[in-house]
Image: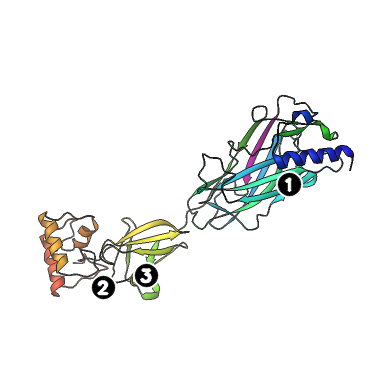
Amino acid sequence: MKISKKIFAILLAVVLTLSIFAVSASAAGTAKGDEWMTVTITTDKGVNTCSTKETVKVTVSIACNYNVPTFRFPIMYDKSVFQAKTLLGQEALGTCATAGTLSFNKITDGSCIPENYDADQFGCILFQWVANTSGSVGCINNPEGEAAFSFELETTAGSAGKTGSIFIPSESNLFYYMAIEDPDVATSFYYLTADTCAMSFVPANVTVEAADVALVPNELYDSTAVIDEENLLVYGLTTGLTSAGDVKEYVTATGGATIRVAPNDVGYGTGSKINLQLGGNTVKTYAMIIFGDIDGDADITAMDITEAVGIFAGTITPENNYKIVAADIGIHDGDLDAMDITTIVGLFAGSLSLDQANPYAE
């Protein structure tokens, strides 16, 4: 290695280790005064959507009009849409593949995320490239642009229907502003600043296709459940439900979703909720209806008659419309009336029966 190359290597190591960018007394090169760099991020998904838990190849391209012997970019991404895989598959491309060393760190403590971003919302990978010093000093200088490096992310299990960004925050203070005037003269490096070198960044957006998530009758138990997708209601259930397990014998989920049953204040009856979840996020919620069960305990009792009479008389204000739906089984006119109360009394007394899956049959 030539002496000049050793000098460059030492100076570059000092710059990268100590982040000292203002040692102009040691710099022999001269700035042109019009230096600029544009960094563009693209993915292999382009304008197409992708699925959850799918690998996304990210390519970072650099266009610049000066000799760049080193760079450092914090690349951020929406954590609700992307996660960094254990093996990022990072690869140096173009000039970077032959003229230097590319390294990266997945930063998990939020230290590479600017203050105006929420570290709980964004992840960050810090990429750094350092030119080699064998022969001419390796550098990047291509105003037309070239693919510099690539790496991989993976869409999360809960990303269905979301769009996530992959970007370099222009507010970051981690960029290197180092240049070299002549790659054959290692001492001809010089320093730029954010004010003297225009740096711009083009992000990439990736859209994950919405999953076909829905609640359906559980065929394993010959379920009689009826799913009202328009109103997000579930009926056709039996009285006497006492647990989430009882409910799950009636319904199951499609699209890779899981079911979480949320009982109301008194039990697993009218007004209880069935939440469909993807990746820990609730993507759809249905309400349970047991006809004749007004108070929500999953049984038809004297309390249901008392509450129905109170609602009809105006002395009780129902806290939700599910009570009205559950009570409207007399003439089915969208309201709670005397005929509905008579029907509920008959159900309680056992003089009437009701098909929960077809309560409005003549």
**Amino acid residing under circle 2:** Gly
- Kindly tell me whether residue 255 is visible in this rendering: yes
1 and 2 marks in contact (CB < 8 Å):
no
Above-or-below relation of 225 to 206: below
- Nearest to N terminus: mark 3 or mark 2: 2
Q: CA distance from mark 3 to mark 1?
A: 52 Å
Which element carries disc 3, helix, strand or loop?
Answer: helix
**Measured from the top left, where is residue 317 in percent x and y?**
17, 54
In the picture of the structure, the residue carrying the numbered disc 2 is: 240
Q: Residues within 10 Å of mark 2 (few under 14, many from 20)?
A: some
Residue type, mark 1 in image: Leu
Which corner quadrant holds the C terminus?
bottom left
SS for dot 2: loop
Give the camera-side residue of 86 and 274.
86
- Does the segment drawn in magenta span residue 199? no
Q: Position of residue 148 (x, y in %)?
A: 71, 43
Q: Earlier in the sequence, mark 1 or mark 2?
A: 1
Label 3 crowd bin: few (<14), some (14–19), many (20+), radius 10 Å: some
* Vertical order, 38 against 108 (above or below): above
Viewer-closest of 86 and 270: 86
Q: Amino acid at mark 3?
A: Lys
